[in-house]
Image (cartoon, helix red, strand yellow):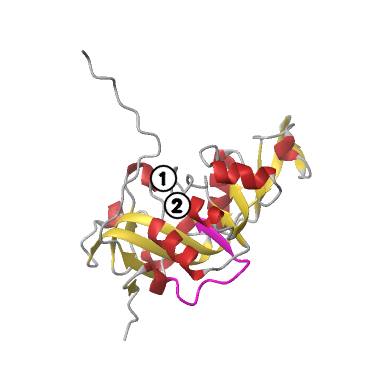
Amino acid sequence: MAVSKVYPDAVTALSGLLRDGMTIMAGGFGLCGIPESLIAAIKESGVEGLTVISNNAGIDGVGLGTLLETRQIKKMISSYVGENATFAKQYLSGELEIEFNPQGTLAERIRAGGAGIPAFFTATGYGTQIAEGKETREFDGRHYVMERGLFADLAIVHAYKGDTEGNLVYRKTARNFNPMMATAAKVTVAEIEHLVQPGEIDPDHIHTPGIFVKRIVKLDNPVKRIEQRTVRKREA
């Protein structure tokens, strides 16, 4: 008999997977498409000393910002962290280690990790602090920096739709980082807004094949947060 990938809640979905000092990839962009329920379950577990790979670190009190507040994160591998005052405070005080990446480089490091590529060369960052301590080479008269692929113990992702076999579909900006992270970890756990049966998703519309996803949790009332609300002023 096949074992179901569907778990009743985020805490149960992460049961047996969490440990101190592990590396976790967390998908999303800003507050869009972040695996918020799984992040909350990690917070509840109390694991610490984490290395977290994510484009950003949420904001104060939301997303990965909650794990920073509890000091469960030891190191962030990120691209943009400007919206989180807690992040800045911990970094400046020496409590948090940061590995900054150009955004495209971070995306490619994750994609490479999922594809089994240990390293690659990019021109981005050559001649800057990004290249310090890294191997550089010249190809066809242009200089490049070697970057290592990234692979995690656990990837947590957020999908708009998925079936019980783990085939996932992401929606718009929430597609950023989630698909590539789903391929770049020993275990991928997905939270899903709309859970359907196998065959209900057009195969051509699947972004992450179910072979990459080990566990699923259905979200009952997902919160769609806006990081920076911008509206027009009302006319008099």
Circle 2 SS class: loop
Disc 1 designates what residue?
Answer: 31
Disc 2 designates what residue?
Answer: 63
- Circle 1: residue type: Leu
Quadrant where the image shows the N terminus: bottom left
Does residue 57 appear anywhere in the picture?
yes
Residue shown at 52% from the left, 47% from the top: 57
Picture coordinates of residue 127, whole percent (x, y): 74, 31
* Most common SS among magenta residues: loop
Q: Nearer the viewer, residue 98 or 70?
A: 70
Where are the magenta residues, as a range? 14-25
**Rounded to the nearest whole Å, what is the CA distance between mark 1 and mark 2?**
7 Å
Residue shown at 50% from the left, 50% from the top: 65
At label 1, counting other C-alpha atoms closer than 10 Å, the crowd grade (few under 14, some 14-19, many 20 or more) is many
Residue shown at 36% from the left, 61% from the top: 191
Q: Would you say the residues marked 1 and 2 are in contact, meaning their CB atoms lie under 8 Å apart? A: yes
- Circle 2: residue type: Gly
| Side (left or right) of 41 relative to 72 | left
Comes first in the chain, label 1 or label 2: 1
